[in-house]
Image (cartoon, grey):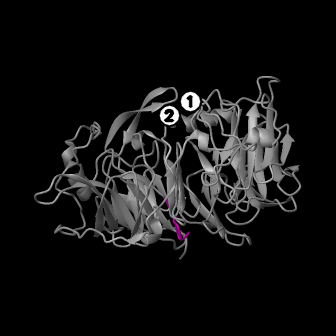
Amino acid sequence: MKTLFRAGIFVALYLLLSACGGASQVTPVSVASPATLIPTSIPNRSATATIEPAITSTRGLLTRPTLIPTIDPTSVPKLLREALSLQTLEGMNGYKIRKITGWQYGFQELPCCGYQWLDSNHLLLYPKTGEGMRPHQDGQRKEDLSSQPVIMNLETGASWLPWSNISTSIYIARELGIVFQQEAYSSATGPIMDAVFTYTFDGKEITYYWGRILGVSPSGEKILVDDDTIIDLRNDKITDLTWHMDYDLEREPKLYWSSDETRIYRCCFYFADLKTGESYNFEWGDLRGTDGKPVSSPMSGHSYGQWVRNDTYFLIEWNYFYDSSAHDIPMFSPSEKTYYDLVEKAGIPSDLFDLPTNSVYMVSPDEMYVWITGFSHVDGTYHSFLVNLTTFESTPYDSAVYKFTWSADSQFGWIDEYDTADAYVLSVDSKELLPFPVNPRQENEALWHPTENVLAYTSKNDHTLALLNAKDMTVEEQELPVSVTDFDWSPNGDRIRFTGTDGGLWQVDYPMFQHFEQITGPMPDINEMFWSPDGNSIAFISGSDIYIVDTIK
């Protein structure tokens, strides 16, 4: 039986544990014109394959985990360097396989992943080096931890170890070929200070900037340091913001960047536009409702959400733990300071479902529509609405939605109903819910093609792949050579990979389906399978090793 749709939201919201702080009113001031950033010259530090700064930060480090088995934590870097290696294996049908092996404890699986692709030739590895207790919705749980990341070149097998403590994050600017992190550094005579160090994927130190990381844009190319400075790694520029933080930023939610990374919002209320040079903070009384009157301060802060309407408005997502008294869905413009209640503007009865404890909303990729689903304690049923975020036109649906995903072009949505075998396609153009001609198997996942309006899913059994064209609602079924447990599109959608029930890996070309090929033999305990960014390789974890399989001969 499917889990309640709203239950999945509880887990996602569990980590959102920061309440919103107050703000003081400041008159908007233009930012000084961005100046060319002159990076701090690099001190005389040898550039080797292994980078280990001599100093350790004195800022509240977390305790190192108990190792598995108990090992002196200071020996972990040396043990990893000596243990990890890259081997080349003979694959099936002429496909090369590489294996990262040697660390018997394996790679971290929870709460995130054991590795990340940096580019198609580099992996960021998270070897298991200990255990620790982490908070969960049902209490604390013991999980494997990784205290020392490793970056490996898949062409040469060379690896290096970024400076690390458990509280340090590694950030990736993938298109620039840069990784960076917070470190503590001092000159020979100066005090220890926070600095941002940048490296190539092969560990060559590039430069460093003074300051403490407080936020990073999705691309990794822009960094907020020390409350009010934006570092642009692509253009080597800095922008000094004129907003005034009057609370501890580290206790507040993350920065929200617009899709082009030129607008920034942080609760409550802080706004910067890097194009116009404006940056300021304001109060509730500066916001105006549709009647032109100041908005009264609500009981809940506007801490979480996302940009909508071409990144001009910010749509609030309520926090389950802190915002249970909310009865509206705010949407406001930080630049124009106009404020809407989506529930009121869209004509949704405010008592129809509870906010936020039993509702969720999914914004379309083009930011112009939102699908809202909620459970009403008034009539004991689910209700859903499709809302146009520009015109506020809304269409109601009596649908108990279990899953909802948008197509890449925002023209269609896939809807899986709770506790039934029924699945639908939402057409934004017609506003209709169109039933699948052939339903997915129960508990099955349907995946949109990366660019086309085509849904892939297994249908009547685990060796039949169905391809639903959402434009004309036609279905093409393909018989697979093996029973499969999962599948995934390649990044550009020209192939589909399958995992057989025996752990073997297969792929087929799309849309012709002319070449079904097995590229690995059966493998035990396969998990965390991801395509490389260029689609020419697939990596996965099996046992205590990471495998990288070429998909192009």
Q: Nearer the viewer, residue 150 or 36?
A: 36
Residue type indicated by callout 2:
Ala
- In the picture, the disc for residue 29 is none
Please say whether residue 4 is visible from this viewpoint. Answer: yes
Residue type indicated by callout 1:
Tyr
Tell me the SS state at disc 2.
loop
Q: Image point 66% across, 40% down: which residue?
A: 294
Name above or below for residue 485 compared with residue 534.
above
Q: Image point 45% across, 42% down: which residue?
A: 110
Residue 536, magenta (yes or no):
yes
Please say whether residue 119 is visible from this viewpoint. Answer: no
- Image quarter for residue 209? bottom left
Residue 453, magenta (yes or no):
no
Question: Callout 1: 10 Å neighbours few (<14), some, many (20+)?
Answer: some
- In primary-sequence order, the first of circles 1 and 2 is 2
Q: Nearer the viewer, residue 278 or 544?
A: 278
Bounds of the magenta span?
532-539
- In the picture, the disc for residue 322 is 1
**Predominant SS of the magenta segment:** loop
- From the viewer's perspective, is 441 left or right of 233? right
Q: Image point 42% across, 39% down: which residue?
A: 251
Question: Callout 2: 10 Å neighbours few (<14), some, many (20+)?
Answer: some
Q: Where is residue 199 drawn, in percent x and y?
A: 32, 66
- In the picture, the disc for residue 19 is 2
The answer to whether the residues at label 1 and label 2 have Cβ atoms under 8 Å apart is yes
Name above or below for residue 65 compared with residue 264.
above
Q: Where is residue 393 drawn, in percent x and y?
A: 84, 49
